[in-house]
Amino acid sequence: MIVAAASLAALCLPGASHAQDAPSDSPLKAALKIVGFATDVSPPPDFVRQSRPAQTPPSIRVFNQPPEPPAAVKSADEIAAIDKELEDVAKRHDALRAAFPPSAKAVADAAAARAAKAKTKGAQKSPIPTF
């Protein structure tokens, strides 16, 4: 009640003309500006205005289904051919890796480390925990 009376008095006072500079301000916002509860938003800096797009981008709907891919559905024979081609490439790459000595050594070291870890893991299992 007191705030309403103060805002009505602030609107009627001649010193309140600075709050009504912007014609889009409602009387309530003008009164809240005088009291100090509302402010005007300053325009963004030039670099912000320059980085924004000229037109507002279209909104993106959240629950729309994505468009179907333009390619036709593959037949079972085409899928089998692609799978065979991928397997051939994988075999070719495996042969290249096996021929490279550091790779073969690294694979052997990793296998030995796994075997050693499995042995120590089996030896450490006991029904009574030790602290």
Image (cartoon, rainbow, N blue to C red):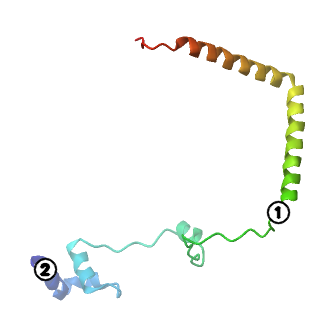
Image quadrant holding the N terminus, namely bottom left
Closer to the chain start, of discs 2 and 1, is 2
Q: Amino acid at mark 1?
A: Lys
Q: On screen, 66 above or below 14?
A: above
Quarter location, residue 119: top right
Task: List x then y, in percent, for residue 104.
Answer: 82, 23
Residue 47 image position (x, y, % from top left): 55, 66
Disc 2 to disc 1, C-alpha distance: 76 Å
Residue 15 in the image: state x and y as whole percent: 20, 83
Measuring from the top left, give residue 51's x and y in whole percent: 58, 68
Give me the disc on residue 7.
Answer: none
Going by the image, does 3 lie left or right of 106? left
Rendered residue at 80%/66% (across/down): 73
Above or below 30: residue 52: above
What residue would you read off at disc 2?
6
| Camera-nearest residue between 103 and 124 | 124
At x 59% / y 79%, what residue is drawn?
Answer: 55
Left or right: 84 in relation to 40: right
Residue position for label 1 = 74
